[in-house]
Structure formats: structure tokens, C-alpha cells
């Protein structure tokens, strides 16, 4: 059966988030972006709507929805602003989801309610200064000393890791050697404020300027042994599965940015005049906008296809990578065309398209670069 229509609940959520993005985010986000300030009030607004608990069961204070609902919310937010969207994406898919999927009953009870309500944020620390694509090359170590892990090392580019409401970061660390040789990598929860855990000042970034990103360092940082997340030695595999889902979410976010470019260009091309005509009357501009719509539309189909396999419980690794690759390309291409259609105003902070342009690039890098997506697709096709 093929039916691409959204069910009533999905459609209602999409509309609610769209209204919120238009009324609460669009009027103010440019200022936060230029000041490089984290928009706490907007995050509280998203929390009040239950967005941080969307795919989690009600017993943890979640909304009892699913991962596709999160994707729809991300698309509508990113249509207006990507900093806000990535704050939600990282909070849910990277911060809370590892605890939900792999946490013990006690860990879930302890952390999930505040993460689902959006009162608190969690972060996900995989990338290190020495490399992100080769995630197995982790250098951070955690040694068991009595009933405590002692963590040493650093993590780079970690989203949501230094806000006033950040409560934890889950990090991958080498906890020993595998029986057959090679690194044993495990995931460990480190609460914010633990002695020996330092959050560096925020990065100065090209885009996502109203989102929170820091380098983290760990110097003899001690956490209780029970902060191990899931099975010892399974940290790498756990994080890879979290990234498969995350790629569908980033694809949705990319589609939002690509569609936001179409929205802005339709408006502008209908108003701006050159040579005695509205620029939208020129075929060169019409074709550009038509191509932008085609990219957004096809990328949306790609993430819907990946999400539908994910929700059916079928393998979706290849589809997730295809969606992420297609959608991040669409975002990048649409952002470039949109700024061109805006002419000089495309280069001004006064209009959102300049922000879209700066925000698009990271979509080809974060949660697996485009090269990594191609490697994964090739591998899924049996190429070794
Ligand atoms: C704003 C921002 C937020 C982020 N948030 C998080 C977060 O919350 N948590 C987290 O863990 N990480 C986060 N990241 C890190 C992100 O996931 C990594 O930057 C990304 O995975 C790439 O890793 P790298 O930067 O180390 O690049 P590298 O791995 O050093 O890659 C450099 C280049 O080499 C290419 N390359 C690498 N290996 C190969 C190969 N085998 N074949 C061909 N090409 C190859 C890459 O595609 C890339 O073009 C964030 C990054 C940014 C910028």
C-alpha cells in the first residue's frame, strides 16, 4: 500500500509547529542569531508544546508519538530557523534517545522526565578533536577504579553541551581491549558539573549561531560505575544506531531549510522589480524556484521513505543515508539559489535567506559527512 498523505495527528502537529515557528520564532530569531545567543524563551515554548517528549512514552512525560512526528516538527522549525531545529534535534535524538534505548530502568527514571519535559537538555559526545568520521578511533578513555569510572580525554563540537539547562552528556570512551584485540568502546553518562569535566567557551561558528556548541574535556573525571549506559563494550554500536535515526532527523531538518528557501523566494520574487517587471515574471527566476521546489519535494520523499521503514522496524540504514545525502544537497543548493534571487539583500542579515545560506553547509557535515553517507550506501550495496 502506498499512501503519502499524513494522518490527522501528524497533520495537526505539523500545523501547530508551523504556527509556532511563524509567530514565536520568525519575528525574533534573527536577533538571537546575530548576538550568537541561545534562545531560552523559544526553547521553553517548544518545551511547553511537548516537542522534547514527542517520540517518548507518556510514562516518562513524553507525548507517546513516534520518530516521524519529531521529523515533521524539525522540518517545520527549520523552514524558519535551523538553530532552533538543531537544538530540538540534538536534545531529543542525541540527548534523550540513547538513554531511552539503552538506559537501565533507574537511568530512565532519573533522567528522562526532565529531558522529555524540556526543562533539561542532554548532549551526545562522540566526535573528538582528532576526528569524527572515524568514530572508532576514540581516544577518550574510561578506567574502572573501584566503583567509579575515571574519564580522561576530550570531545569536540558537542551540541547543547553548555546551556544553563544542560544536565548531562553521554560520551563514548575506550574502556579496555576486546577479547580478539581492538578497542572496547562504551558509553558513559557524565552529569554536568562533575569535577574534572570542563566545558570550554562556546565556538564562534559560521552558522547555527543561536545554537549551543562546545568542546568538552575530561581530566580524571569520576562518575559512578552505574553511569555506564547499556552493555560495556557496546558503546560504538549503540551510537551508530542512534546516528542512523539521527540522519533521518537531519534529512527532515534539511528539507525544512530547502522549503524555507522556496517560501522566501516566492514572496520576494513577487515583490521585487527589475527592468519594469517583478523578477518572478522572468523565466530564469521561475526555473530557479521550480528547481528549488523539486529538490525540497524529492528530498522529503526520501526522508518519508526512510522513516516509514524505520517505523515498520525494517532495516533502514541505506535509506537514512540516501535521505541525509539528498536532503543536505537540496538544502545547500536551495540556499545558494535563494541568496542569488535576493541579490544584494541575500547578503544582508535583514532577510532569512542569508542565515539559511550559512546554516546549510553544516548539514553536509554533521551526523556523518556526505562522503560518509556515500561510504555507507556503497557498503549497504555490498561493496567492500
Ligand atoms: C556545529 C556542529 C555541531 C556538532 N554536534 C555534534 C554533537 O552534538 N555530537 C558529536 O559527537 N559530534 C557533533 N559534531 C561533529 C560532527 O558530527 C563531525 O564534525 C562530523 O562527523 C565530521 O567529523 P570531523 O569534523 O572530525 O571531520 P573528519 O572526520 O576529520 O573529516 C574531514 C573530511 O574528510 C572526509 N573523510 C573522512 N574519512 C574519509 C574517507 N574514509 N573517505 C573519504 N573521505 C573521508 C570527510 O568526509 C570530511 O570531508 C558537530 C559538528 C558541528 C560542526
Image (spheres, rainbow, N blue to C red):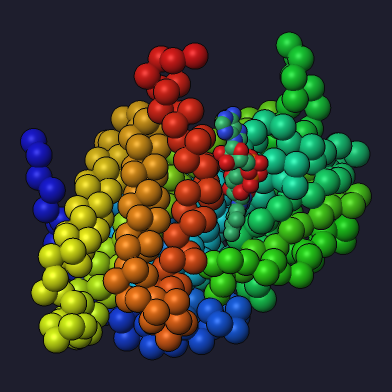
Residue visible at 18% across and 77% down?
279
Quarter of the image that includes the N terminus = top left
Residue 158 relative to residue 105: left or right:
right
Residue 231 appears in the figure: no
Query: Which residue sits furthest top?
Result: 180
Q: Quadrant of ligand 1?
A: top right
Residue visible at 14% across and 71% down?
282
Query: Can you give x and y, in whole percent of width and height, for residue 10 in the image?
Result: 21, 60
Q: Where 365 falls versus 142 (above or below)?
A: below
Query: Can you give x and y, in whole percent of width and height, for residue 38 in the image?
Result: 58, 77
Query: Can you give x and y, in whole percent of width and height, for residue 383 in the image?
Result: 44, 15
Residue visible at 27% across and 63% down?
259
| Depth check, front residue: 131 or 120 | 131
Q: Quadrant of residue 26?
A: bottom left
Q: Where 264 falls versus 174 (above or below)?
A: below
Query: Can you give x and y, in whole percent of width and height, for residue 51 in the image?
Result: 40, 67
Total number of numbered discs in the rendering? 0
Q: Quadrant of residue 69?
A: bottom left
Residue visible at 31% across and 30% down?
314
Q: Quadrant of residue 58?
A: bottom left
Residue 282 relative to residue 235: left or right:
left
Q: Where 140 falls versus 192 (above or below)?
A: above
Q: Where 24 falls versus 330 (above or below)?
A: below
Residue 86 appears in the figure: yes
| Depth check, front residue: 317 or 351 | 351
Amino acid at each position: 500500500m502506498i499512501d503519502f498523505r499524513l494522518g490527522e495527528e501528524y497533520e495537526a502537529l505539523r500545523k501547530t509547529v508551523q504556527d509556532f515557528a511563524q509567530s514565536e520564532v520568525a519575528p525574533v530569531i534573527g536577533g538571537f542569531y546575530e548576538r550568537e545567543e541561545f534562545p531560552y524563551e523559544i526553547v521553553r515554548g517548544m518545551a511547553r508544546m511537548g516537542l522534547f517528549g514527542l517520540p517518548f512514552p507518556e510514562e516518562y512525560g513524553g507525548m507517546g508519538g513516534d520518530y516521524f512526528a519529531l521529523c515533521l516538527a524539525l522540518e517545520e522549525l527549520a523552514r524558519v530557523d535551523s538553530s532552533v531545529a538543531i537544538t530540538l534535534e540534538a536534545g531529543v535524538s542525541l540527548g534523550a534517545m540513547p538513554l531511552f534505548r539503552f538506559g537501565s530502568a533507574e537511568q530512565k527514571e532519573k533522567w528522562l522526565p526532565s529531558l522529555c519535559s524540556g526543562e533539561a537538555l542532554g548532549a551526545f559526545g562522540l566526535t573528538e578533536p582528532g576526528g569524527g568520521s572515524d568514530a572508532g578511533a576514540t581516544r577518550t578513555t574510561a578506567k574502572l577504579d573501584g566503583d567509579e569510572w575515571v574519564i580522561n580525554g576530550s570531545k569536540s563540537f558537542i551540541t547543547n553541551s553548555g546551556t544553563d539547562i544542560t544536565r548531562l552528556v553521554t560520551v563514548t570512551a575506550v574502556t579496555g581491549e576486546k577479547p580478539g584485540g581492538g578497542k572496547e568502546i562504551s558509553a558513559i553518562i557524565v552529569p554536568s558539573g562533575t569535577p574534572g569535566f570542563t566545558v570550554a567557551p562556546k565556538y564562534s561558528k559560521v552558522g547555527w549561531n543561536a545554537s549551543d556548541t562546545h568542546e568538552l574535556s575530561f581530566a580524571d573525571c569520576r562518575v559512578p560505575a552505574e553511569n555506564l549506559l547499556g552493555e560495556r563494550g557496546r558503546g560504538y554500536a549503540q551510537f551508530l544506531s542512534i546516528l542512523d535515526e539521527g540522519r533521518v532527523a537531519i534529512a527532515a531538518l534539511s528539507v525544512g531549510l530547502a522549503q524555507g528557501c522556496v517560501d522566501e523566494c516566492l514572496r520576494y520574487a513577487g515583490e521585487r522589480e527589475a527592468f519594469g517587471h517583478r523578477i518572478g515574471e522572468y523565466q530564469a527566476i521561475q526555473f530557479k524556484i521550480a528547481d528549488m521546489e523539486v529538490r525540497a519535494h524529492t528530498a522529503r520523499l526520501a526522508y518519508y521513505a526512510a522513516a516509514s521503514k524505520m517505523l515498520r522496524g525494517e532495516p533502514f540504514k541505506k535509506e537514512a543515508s540516501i535521505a541525509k545525502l539528498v536532503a543536505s544537497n537540496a538544502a545547500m543548493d536551495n540556499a545558494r539559489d535563494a541568496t542569488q534571487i535576493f541579490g544584494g539583500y541575500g547578503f544582508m542579515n535583514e532577510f532569512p535567506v542569508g542565515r539559511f545560506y550559512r546554516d546549510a553547509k553544516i548539514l553536509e557535515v554533521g551526523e556523518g559527512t556526505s562522503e560518509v553517507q556515500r561510504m555507507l550506501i556503497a557498503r549497504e550495496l555490498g561493496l567492500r
